[in-house]
Image (cartoon, helix red, strand yellow):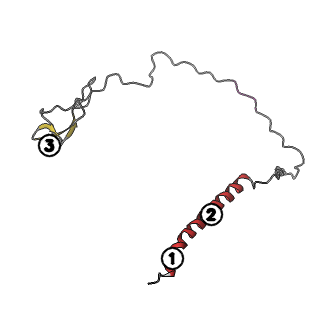
Amino acid sequence: MPENPTATTERDRFPLVVKSAAGLVVAGVIAGSLLLSGGGGDEQVAVTNPAVPTITDADGSGSGPAETPPRPAEAPPVSLAAPAVGTETAVIAPKTKPKPTAGTRPGREPRFARLGRACPRPGAISLDRRYEPLVCRNGRWDELF
C-alpha cells in the first residue's frame, strides 16, 4: 500500500509553523528593544523647553514680572504659661492595675496539655511540651495519632 502523501506534509508542516512563530517572537523582541532604547541611531534629538505663558493682570498689563504683596508685620512669639499647681489635668494612665480576665493569670504563660489529664470539652485539640498533638476524648487528653 502506498503511504498517504497528505499525512507526511501535515507532519512536516508542524515544525515549520513552530520555527516561524519563534522567529516572529525573536524579531518582535529585537524591534521592541530598539524602540525602547531610542531607535538605535546616533542622531541626537534636541530637547526644547516649552514657551512660558504670559499672565496678564485684571488691568490688562502683563509686561512686567508679578510683584509680591507686602508682608504683614510679624506678630511677637506667643509664650505659654505653666499651669497653676493643684489644677485639674488630664489622666494619662489608670490609677489602678486592670484586673486579669478570667482564665489567665498575670506572669504565667499558657500551659501545655498533659497526656491523661482532664480536658475542657470533647474534640478539643492541643499540644504537649514536645509539640505533639493531643485530642480531648472522654474528658481526658489523648494522643491524636
Label 3 or label 1, whichever comes before in sequence order? 1
Local crowd at mark 1 within 10 Å, few (<14), some, or many (≥20)? few
Residue annotated with mark 1 = 8
Q: Earlier in the sequence, mark 1 or mark 2?
A: 1
Asked if residue 26 is positioned above or below residue 143 in the image, the reply reads below
- The residue most toward the top is 85
The secondary structure that most of the magenta stretch takes on is loop
In the picture, measured across the screen, residue 1 lies left or right of residue 100, that is: right
Amino acid at pointer 2: Gly
What segment carries the magenta color?
Answer: 72-76
Alpha carbon separation for disc pair 1 and 2: 24 Å
Q: CA distance from mark 3 to mark 1?
A: 71 Å
Q: Residue furthest left?
A: 138
Q: Label 2: few (<14), some or many (≥20) within 10 Å?
A: few
Pointer 3: residues within 10 angstroms few (<14), some, or many (20+)? few
- Residue 23 marker: 2
Q: Nearer the viewer, mark 1 or mark 2?
A: 1
Q: CA distance from mark 3 to mark 2?
A: 67 Å
Residue where numbered disc 3 is placed: 122
Q: Residue at x 80, y 38 (%)?
A: 69
